Image (cartoon, rainbow, N blue to C red):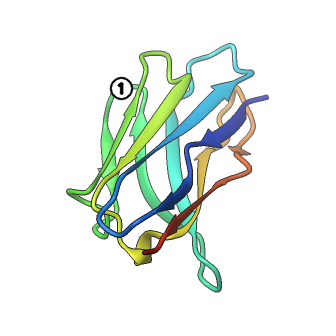
C-alpha cells in the first residue's frame, strides 16, 4: 500500500515562495503518476499539477509559469515549487496517486499553505 506524506506548507507573504514535498513509501513498484491537488475553504478540491515516472508534467492554467513540479528518479519524493504566491493560492495541498493493478489509490493528509501579509 502506498503512503503519501506532504510537508513544506506554511505562511508566506504575497509574492513569496514555498516548496512542498510529497514523500511516497510502501510500494515495491515505481509509482507511475503523482498529482498535487488543493482545496480552499468552501471550495472543491482542484488539481494543480501532475508528474509521471516518465517525466511528463501538466499544470492547471492558474499556476502555469509560477509552479514547478519535479520528482526524483524513483518517484519517492515529488516537489512542488511555488513562486509568486497570491492569496488565491491559499489552501490545503494534497498529493495523490490513483489506483493501479499493483497498488490502491492513496492521498496524503495535506499541508496548509497560507498566503497573507
State the residue in front, 97 or 82. Answer: 82
The x and y percentages for residue 103 are 72, 30
Disc 1: which residue: 54
Where disc 1 sits, the SS reads loop
Note whether 32 is above or below 7 in the view shown.
above
Note whether 94 is above or below 78 in the view shown.
below
State the residue in front, 90 or 109. Answer: 90
Specify the farthest residue to the bottom. 42
State the residue in front, 85 or 39. Answer: 85
Q: Is residue 110 left or right of residue 114?
A: right
The x and y percentages for residue 112 are 62, 59
Residue at 51% over, 51% down: 36
Residue at 59% over, 47% down: 95
Specify the farthest residue to the left. 65
The x and y percentages for residue 23 are 61, 30
Quarter of the image for residue 57 reads top left
**What crowding class fits label 1: few (fewer than 14 Cα within 10 Å), some (14-19), or many (20 or more)?**
few
Circle count: 1
Quarter of the image for residue 88 reads bottom left
**Quadrant in which the N terminus appears:** top right
Note whether 114 is above or below 76 in the view shown.
below
Q: Is residue 77 left or right of residue 94?
A: left
The x and y percentages for residue 8 are 55, 44
Amino acid at each position: 500500500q502506498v503512503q503519501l506524506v506532504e510537508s513544506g506548507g506554511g505562511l508566506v507573504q504575497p509574492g513569496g515562495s514555498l516548496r512542498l514535498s510529497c514523500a511516497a513509501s510502501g510500494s515495491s513498484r515505481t509509482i507511475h503518476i503523482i498529482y498535487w491537488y488543493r482545496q480552499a475553504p468552501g471550495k472543491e478540491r482542484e488539481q494543480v499539477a501532475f508528474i509521471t515516472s516518465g517525466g511528463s508534467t501538466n499544470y492547471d492554467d492558474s499556476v502555469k509559469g509560477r509552479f514547478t513540479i519535479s520528482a526524483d528518479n524513483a518517484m519517492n519524493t515529488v516537489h512542488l515549487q511555488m513562486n509568486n504566491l497570491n492569496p488565491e493560492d491559499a489552501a490545503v495541498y494534497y498529493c495523490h496517486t490513483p489506483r493501479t493493478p499493483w497498488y490502491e489509490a492513496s492521498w496524503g493528509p495535506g499541508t496548509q499553505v497560507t498566503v497573507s501579509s
